[in-house]
Image (cartoon, coloured by chain):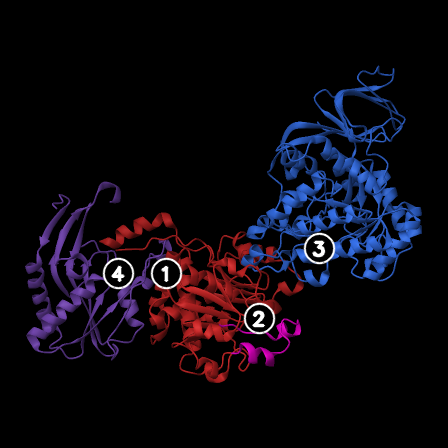
């Protein structure tokens, strides 16, 4: 593998409190040097990145790659490429496939397909319960041994508080977090969008914020009890953010993620029955997006995760009740957040890098999230001022179910480097 | 010739996005159509050659029959498609159904569907006129119009009247269409229901929430009593039909306490002894059969007003007529 | 207000004279007022029909039954029209029209299409023994083989002109004007 010298970029590495023009040298899959000026080794590939930002590779803790079982929506290969095109060097694949990733062979399959894909790294997660049925704990040790970086029943919550307690206790042997999709299914039953005036007008069943808040609070209380590592997925409510802030203050080992769409969109986006705005948890209200932005800024919420949920176009081309939940997010996340959070001054660029790279790496104890010498050579190069328009035709993902199509964005990934190898380059 | 040249659009999906003037045109036109059903030959040739499909994804007797009468009295050719009799049952999607209808060159579709937004979904995908005959818990605009017409017939106006909708507001498309129509025509609207059957944010639409049926009776000029479906009890929204009747049932004894003469509307089919007692349903203030009669006139008006028509030819036609 | 494009061709007295003569002609043709029914075509035909009923009552002492027809739903050009015209009311005498002599009264006879519609509509109400057509103005220009039985006045009309009958209820006066249409509307 040839060394790579990234010359003259604006290197942003929150871990080293660095935001300055630097050269960066990658050799043998590792970061080897970072300095104002570096001489290129003889055989090095030199990339002039003046005017571009260079940061530790972006990591998405929450993606649905649909394989096995949903290959018409996405495959591990297409998802890993879409991730790379969005500037992500690593993604965590959720286990709610068909069959669910609940045994070591399935974990091994995801890992192997991910390696073969040659895009972003694909880290498997394993199910908490066998078949994601919410009844019996999986062989967590076996899953971790096979390569799972966390356990989660995502797609579904762990409704049984007893099982959740056991998962939080048992997983401590292996040092992995337990991620939960917080939703009380009894309170959200039949719901397809946020409960409130818009749902009432459209005649759609609502999902109350409370259905999420009660489970977030439950998980946090179980954190008090067990001291197990909890990761709360796709937090969408102001109440949830407040509860997490309070729990962190009292020392609960909790991390949390928020999606770009819950930061930027409200229930109004569902107006006219737009199925590309149907997701779980549902888009909430302006008060929630404001609270979530504040929680992301103050670190209450550790990271941004896309909850990339590809669906075939004809699955979304249905009556609202019939359409599946979820939107794609890998290829729009960086541009959306630069445009809507960094440009208006709600978050500085270094903090965005922290929430998209360092925060996720810490939450799931993944390699990366830093450019310190000897760390893994996962690097994202992006143009913070590059303007583009979200276009279905340009997606690498197999699916295009995005409410952001047609949006004019600023900020775009240019080069994605995984383990010292360029896996994607714009243009 | 004086015309109210008011564009009504291609489809009738709901009353929420209509203006008061547009609603009045539907009602005034329905007024003229009432007489046709009293003729010896109850048929006019105005929709001759038009093909109308009644596409029902949900069982319905009254609404379908009412539409069918309206269509036949206007001389349209009609085809009925019900879920059990079509490929819908075989898992064909709504969009495929729409494309197939389009390919058969039909002029109008009357659609009933269990999903909110289904009528709009169809309307956006086919050139034919789409008339919503009830979509999920969203709207049932022709029911809303016929309720307005019935109130106007018997009270001479809608504006300024106190109208209370009683019952399962949460799941009711009739309630929503009524609320929009009544508010636009200037009525004071209230809803009365157990909180479990009240959609969140309903007061923000501009309606008053009354907790007890006694309060509603004291306040109202008109009660629109909705059907309480058995499923609601099974789903636990109310503990039993018996208790619902005892707490929310419209009975003669309760009506005796009314301040003024109250009109009683019910979209049917009724559960006698649940939301409404028989002596009220069959009593002198019951508008239930008038509603059924008006239903045909309203649907004739809607079909007539939406069918075909190329606006660019209207001027030429008017000039020729003027001679 | 003097409108150069509008020339009166019959004033109130002229119209009343014509209506008086038309009433006499109708009674004569029908050999009396037995079973005679007057049906005006909405809208100005209805007012003329009432004038005729009054004239007959003055002369014969009998008030004959009358009604009116709105032919909108029987028009042959509806497919081309949008937005839809407002529908007027149709009201025929309570005794029906079976075996009656029905007089269709209209203000102006032109293409004959309105009369065709009125005939079709009447037939849906029953089987009259005889139908007469009575118009205040025949301006020629027929497109269908339809001829009036009783006419108030024949008027020659140029291509850019039209005839307007005015009635007090709708127009504030009784009369007939010849109107030259502005170029763009012609």
* In the image, residue C112 above or below residue B163: above
Tell me how far mark 3 sits from mark 1, CA to CA: 46 Å
Identify the chain of the residue marked 1, using the numbered disc in the image: B
Q: Which mark is residue A213?
A: 3
Instruction: Quadrant for residue C105, please give it.
Output: bottom left
Tell me how far mark 2 sits from mark 4, CA to CA: 57 Å
Check if mark 3 and mark 1 are on a common chain.
no
Identify the chain of the residue marked 2, using the numbered disc in the image: B
Residue at image coords 12%, 59%: C174
Image coords of residue A304 (percent x, y): 73, 41
Q: Nearer the viewer, mark 4 or mark 1?
A: 1
Q: Indicate the secondary structure of the residue bearing disc 2.
A: loop
Q: Nearer the viewer, mark 4 or mark 3?
A: 3
Q: Indicate the secondary structure of the residue bearing disc 3.
A: helix
**Chain letter, purple:** C
Q: Colour of chain B?
A: red
Tell me how far mark 4 sits from mark 1, CA to CA: 28 Å
Residue furthest front as drawn = A250
Q: Is residue B230 magenta?
A: yes
Residue position marked by numbered label 2 in the rendering: B194
Check if mark 2 and mark 4 are on a common chain.
no
Image coords of residue C47 (percent x, y): 18, 65
Marks 4,3: beta carbons within 8 A: no
Range shown magenta? B225-249
The crowd level at tag 4 (other Cα within 10 Å; few <14, some 14-19, many 20+) is many
Residue at image coords 33%, 71%: B35
Image coords of residue B224 (percent x, y): 47, 71
Q: Quadrant of the N terminus of chain A?
A: top right
Of C158 and B19, which appears nearest the observer?
A: B19
* In the image, residue A202 above or below residue A42: below
Instruction: Quadrant for residue B271, please give it.
Output: bottom right
Residue position marked by numbered label 1 in the rendering: B24
């Amino acid at each position: 593998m040839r060394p790579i010298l990234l010359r003259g970029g604006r290197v942003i590495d929150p871990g080293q409190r660095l935001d300055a023009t630097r050269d960066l040298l990658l050799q043998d899959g590792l970061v080897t040097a970072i300095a104002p000026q570096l001489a290129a080794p003889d055989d090095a590939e030199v990339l002039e990145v003046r005017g571009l930002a260079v940061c530790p590779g972006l990591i998405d803790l929450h993606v649905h790659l649909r394989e096995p079982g949903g290959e018409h929506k996405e495959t591990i290969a297409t998802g890993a490429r879409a991730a790379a095109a969005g500037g992500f060097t690593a993604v965590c694949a959720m286990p709610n496939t068909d069959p669910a990733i609940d045994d070591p062979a399935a974990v091994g399959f995801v890992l192997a397909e991910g390696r073969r894909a040659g895009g972003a790294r694909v880290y498997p997660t394993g199910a908490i319960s066998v078949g994601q049925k919410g009844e019996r704990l999986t062989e967590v040790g076996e899953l971790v041994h096979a390569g799972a970086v966390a356990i989660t029943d995502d797609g579904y919550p762990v409704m049984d508080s007893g099982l959740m307690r056991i998962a939080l206790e048992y997983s401590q042997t292996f040092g992995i977090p337990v991620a939960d999709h917080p939703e009380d299914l009894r309170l959200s039953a039949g719901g397809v969008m946020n409960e409130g005036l818009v749902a009432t007008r459209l005649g759609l069943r609502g999902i109350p914020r409370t259905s999420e808040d009660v489970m977030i609070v439950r998980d946090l209380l179980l954190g008090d009890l067990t001291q197990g590592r909890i990761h709360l997925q796709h937090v969408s409510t102001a109440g949830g953010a407040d509860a997490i802030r309070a729990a962190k203050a009292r020392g609960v080992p909790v991390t949390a993620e928020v999606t770009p769409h819950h930061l930027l969109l409200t229930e109004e986006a569902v107006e006219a029955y737009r199925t590309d705005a149907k997701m779980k948890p549902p888009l909430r209200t302006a008060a929630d997006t404001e609270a979530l932005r504040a929680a992301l800024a103050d670190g209450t919420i550790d990271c941004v995760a896309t909850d990339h949920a590809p669906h075939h176009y004809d699955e979304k081309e249905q009556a609202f009740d019939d359409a599946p939940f979820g939107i794609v997010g890998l290829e729009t996340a960086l541009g959306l957040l630069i445009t809507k959070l960094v440009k208006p001054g709600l978050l500085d660029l270094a903090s965005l890098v922290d929430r998209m790279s360092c925060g996720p790496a810490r939450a799931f104890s993944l390699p990366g999230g830093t450019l310190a010498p000897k760390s893994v050579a996962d690097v994202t190069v992006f143009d913070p001022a590059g303007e583009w328009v979200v276009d279905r035709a340009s997606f690498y993902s197999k699916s295009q179910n995005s409410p952001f199509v047609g949006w004019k964005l600023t900020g775009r990934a240019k080069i994605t480097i995984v383990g010292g190898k360029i896996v994607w380059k714009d243009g | 010739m004086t015309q109210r040249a008011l564009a009504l659009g291609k489809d009738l999906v709901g009353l929420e996005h209509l203006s008061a003037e547009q609603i009045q045109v539907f009602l005034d036109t329905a007024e003229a159509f009432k007489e046709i059903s009293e003729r010896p030959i109850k048929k006019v040739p105005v929709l001759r050659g038009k093909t109308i499909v009644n596409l029902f994804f949900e069982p319905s007797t009254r609404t379908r029959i009412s539409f069918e009468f309206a269509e036949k009295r206007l001389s349209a050719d009609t085809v009925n498609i019900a879920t059990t009799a079509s490929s819908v049952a075989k898992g064909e999607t709504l969009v495929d159904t729409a494309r197939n209808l389009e390919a058969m060159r039909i002029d109008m579709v009357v659609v009933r569907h269990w999903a909110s937004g289904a009528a709009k979904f169809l309307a956006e995908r086919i050139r034919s006129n789409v008339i919503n005959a009830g979509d999920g818990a969203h709207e049932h605009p022709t029911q809303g119009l016929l309720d307005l017409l019935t109130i106007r017939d018997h009270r001479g106006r809608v504006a300024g009247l106190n109208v209370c909708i009683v019952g399962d507001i949460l799941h009711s498309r009739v309630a929503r269409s009524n609320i929009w129509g009544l508010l636009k025509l200037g009525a004071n609207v209230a809803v009365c229901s157990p909180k479990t059957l009240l959609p969140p944010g309903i007061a923000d639409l501009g309606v008053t929430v009354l907790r007890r049926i006694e309060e509603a009776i004291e306040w109202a000029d008109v009660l629109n009593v909705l059907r309480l479906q058995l499923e609601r009890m099974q789903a636990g929204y109310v503990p039993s039909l018996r208790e619902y009747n005892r707490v929310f049932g419209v009975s003669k004894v309760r009506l005796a306490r009314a301040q003024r003469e109250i009109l009683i509307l019910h979209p049917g089919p009724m559960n006698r002894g649940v939301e409404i007692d028989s002596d009220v349903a069959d009593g002198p203030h019951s508008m239930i059969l008038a509603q059924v009669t008006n239903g045909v006139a309203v649907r004739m008006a809607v079909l007539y007003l939406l069918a075909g028509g190329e606006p660019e030819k209207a001027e030429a036609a008017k000039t020729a007529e003027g001679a | 207000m003097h409108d150069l494009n509008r020339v009166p061709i019959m004033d109130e007295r002229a119209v009343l004279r014509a209506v008086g003569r038309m009433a006499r002609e109708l009674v004569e043709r029908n050999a009396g007022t037995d079973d005679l029914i007057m049906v005006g075509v909405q809208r100005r035909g209805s007012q003329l029909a009432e004038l005729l009923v009054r004239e007959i009552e003055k002369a014969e002492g009998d008030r004959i039954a009358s009604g009116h027809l709105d032919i909108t739903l029987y028009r042959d050009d509806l497919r081309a029209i949008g937005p839809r015209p407002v529908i007027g009311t149709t009201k025929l005498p309570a005794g029906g029209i079976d075996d009656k002599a029905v007089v269709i009264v209209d203000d102006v006879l032109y293409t004959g299409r309105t009369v065709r519609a009125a005939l079709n509509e009447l037939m849906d109400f029953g089987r009259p023994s005889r139908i007469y057509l009575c118009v205040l103005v025949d301006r020629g220009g027929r497109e269908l083989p339809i001829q009036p039985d009783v006419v108030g006045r024949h008027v020659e009309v140029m291509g850019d002109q039209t005839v307007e009958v005015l009635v007090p209820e709708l127009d504030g006066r009784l009369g007939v004007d010849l109107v030259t249409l502005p170029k763009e509307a012609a």
